[in-house]
Amino acid sequence: MSDTIILEPKNKSAAPSSAAKRGPQTVKLAETVIEIVSDSGEGAQRCGQSLASIAAKMGNGVWTVEIIPAEIQPPARSVAGASGNRVRIGTRPISNGGDEADLVVAFNEQVLLGRVRADELKPGCIILLESMWRTDRNPAVVASYTATHAQLMEAGYRVYEIPMEQECRKLVSDPRRGKNMFVLGMLCRIYSLDLDLGREQIAITFGKKDQKVISSNIGLLEAGWNWADANLDFRYSIPAARATQPQLVVNGNTALALGVLASGMDICAMYPITPATSVSHYLSDVFERVGGLVHQAEDEIAACAFAVGASYAGKCTVTVTSGPGYSLKQEAIGLAVMAEIPMVVINVQRGGPSTGQPTKGEQGDLLTAIYGSHGDAPKVVIAASSIEDCFYSVITARKIAEMFNMVVVVLSDTNLATGQQPFTRPKFSESWLAPPFDQSEVADGSKPYDWDRVTGLARRFVPGQPHGMHTLTGLAHDRDSHVAYDAVSNEDGLRSRSLKLAALQKTLRPPKVFGGDSGDLLIVGWGSTKGAIEEAVERLRAEGLKVSSMHLQFLQPMAPGMKEIMQRFGKVITVESNWSDDPNDEIIDAENRRYSALAMMLRARTLIDIDCWTEVRGRPIKPGTVAEAVRAKLQH
Amino acid sequence: MTLEATHCLLRMYEEHHDLEDYQGGVPRWCNGCGDNAILAAMQRLCRDNDLRPEKTVFVSGIGCSSRLPHYMRTYGFHGIHGRALPVAEGIKMARPDLNVFISTGDGDCCSIGAGHWIHGIRYNMNMTMVLHDNHVYGLTKKQASPTSPRGFKSNTTPRGAYLDALNPLNVTLGVQNVSFVAQAVDWIPELLYDILTAAYRHRGFSFVRVIQRCPEFLPKVFDPWLQNPQKTLVLTHERGLRLSANLANVYKNQREHDPLDIDRAREIASLEDPIPVGILYQDPEVPCYEDLRHAGQLRTADYVRAGLEAEFDKFTVWPAEKEQSKPAA
């Protein structure tokens, strides 16, 4: 293969616009997957995010996936240290990170190897590799580079060695900072993106810095464009259809924070934890502008107890965390359940157990969310399945929490947290906001837990309401909120708290089926896997297979009508990103196999022999992988 | 401080309250338990300051001390072990218009809740915390607490407690932003009442340690102090406690102590015999966390909407035909 082109930079200073008229033919693509990887701190993430924003502004569908090493400063040039971004761009809306990459930009060969070994590259894909290592002073680096380069060539990749740093040095003294914008310029040229949008993006990105920084980066952007224009022999375009409605382009954590603003909640109590913290970073910056505040508590327990206190006092409060923090909050969550205090808990899931994989995604907390805390502690659990969903889930959660005096857990995960996808800009509605808290007088003799016999609901008395005085307690209590250990009171309380879930369930609609109403196989999913599952279903149906999917927003309580839907399919499997035993493992059999979380829940609820397919690789599930798994299930 | 809409309601009418207006159920503490004295002083304090029962919340954790809210006829929050402080902080942050009191014990505060204690002092929110310190776990039947004397034989230390007792006054006085520290004993009810009143009137986080008897599990430990008034050192000052003539006659071991003097306060805090009683430290100038955090802006729907739309604008990609009409950046 003669695709390796060691390019000598040509002396070229033509304006980008005139250059676009010449050069190789532009190939139209329906979609493509691009990765930019570097050592941590070299700006590949910023490059990827900027690329996604530009494409989104062109009207393309985009989805981004962050590639994050667990350490803040992993050793330079290490396989495990790959940091960057995957950007999938398409003509149609994009709902997931896609399969293997079509083009990879790598700032050194080691981080590239990380992606190769993780099977993230399409066979024969284009690699744009920084070439400076070929002439490095350290012979070991040169040896490693040349060997890796030779291997990649051998393996059939189209490797283009590019003197990125050398080119940048013509413009700036420290090319290590700024190389990313040079790369952005190259990518804009390769994918025929609007260079003006690139300049605009740089102005936004560096808006807080002075004009010099902006000008210097725009210079690098243009240099990248010109270089690609003069030296690369391929061009693509991904036709875009600009949306007719204004679109918001944010990641899932920003969407959650915007949801908090829009929900009318005033207080977020939190403790820093990856990957949830960026919700609070953004909220800390903007919450006070709408009269709210973020309280960074001394620990996760305090954050949750603070939220319980504020909610009790009349202002439904949110606490945001991830796995280990969620475990620490369990006792206080139990208190809120027992005392029937509305509260929203957001869990941006990461790999577990214990410290697990802080920067990588997993759907491992479903059962903890449903059954967490001790004793029978019914709470509502909903899961966001897209960036847009992150926004609306918080509003829904606050409303349910206050209507039913319950804890509502919102599950997101790393994939949504750092993924970006445009969605229609929400139209503000006053109904999103919490009503002012009730300070009216309570009729004398009213009981603070006057549980309705049918629904279990009771009106809550808030401090400040005359005649509503009572002592709320986490102990078993009767309708007067008096500590009561007698059998009747205990069961009265347990029954009422449980009934509220049924009352909520009665208001839910059956989930929609994606694909056909009946068929050979139904995939059931929840959370961030929605995009990948539905794309897999589309591909399988295009092959003529009778496969559909159903995605659950409510995990506790569960929507009605699901059993009836499942019975219209030959097989039902869940697709999840949590652990399940492989039935092919030597000692695993039908009796001891541990099913994935949703499968376990659904089997118990429907008595249908639901199977599961799961993957816990610390990365988003790919549509191609799901499709392959389904084909295999259909053959059995 | 922030004005809540509910503040105006408060001032529309004045009301007189009697002791019974603050009395809840019949206490189920042992006879002779120091908790009874604290409860009585609290009820008196509420009456004398005409606290509206519906605007008053007693928050507690778990333990004998933490049953106190059940015996008040105000709002009460009997939560979970060690977490009374963060709950109370949440209440105060959401509702600065409420009077917030915290009842906690030596296990609840100094052991399982020690982290929250340190940070509660630092937040300096305007509320009063009473540490019912009887040096033992009572509700769970006689285990050593962090303030148990060394050598104390309990169910978990059958050969005697191994470590020296923690001194809660020293700990409190060592934390940045401390603004009010006092000590009382359950067997001098007049001083207990005076100290709690000073704590309530202090604007900031008031920490009052009450040394109290547990007649069930540590019955005789304070007998020498009860029998000999000289073993009590009463701290007096024009900005602190002033003794009545009657009390001054009994408790002759007195010392002028300026509550603004933190170095002297730390020295006094270290005394074990005599036991210091009075206000060790008070600085009315320390800012309250809730005042620092509240913008004082009333949240109307329009206000939230304007803030939210401004955030949306930052992230919006406008359709081509509306490019002209998009708001200025």
Image (cartoon, coloured by chain):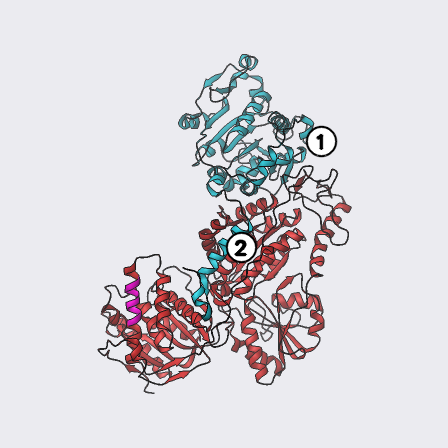
Chain colours: A red, B cyan
Magenta residues?
Answer: A214-222
Q: Position of residue B57 (x, y in %)?
A: 61, 36
Q: Position of residue A480 (x, y in %)?
A: 73, 41
Q: Is residue B266 above or below residue A444?
A: above
Query: Dot 1 surroundings within 10 Å: few (below 14), some, or many (20 or more)?
Result: few
Three-letter amino acid code at disc 2? Val
Residue at disc 2, secondary structure: helix
Q: Is residue A220 magenta-colored?
A: yes
Which label was assigned to residue B26?
A: 1
Q: Chain of mark 2?
A: A
Left or right of residue A224, residue B201 in this image = right
How far across and how far down the image is residue A77, in percent? 33, 67
Pointers 2 and 1 within a single chain: no
* Magenta stretch prevailing secondary structure: helix
Mark nearer the viewer, 2 or 1? 2
| In the image: residue A97, left or right of residue A210 | right
Does the stretch in magenta take in B100?
A: no
Which numbered tag is attached to residue B51?
none
Q: Marks 2/1: CA distance? A: 43 Å
Using the rendered image of the protein, determine whether residue B98 is visible from the camera's viewpoint.
no
The answer to whether marks 2 and 1 mark residues whose Cβ atoms lie closer than 8 Å is: no
The residue at which mark 2 appears reads as A260
Q: Chain of mark 1?
A: B
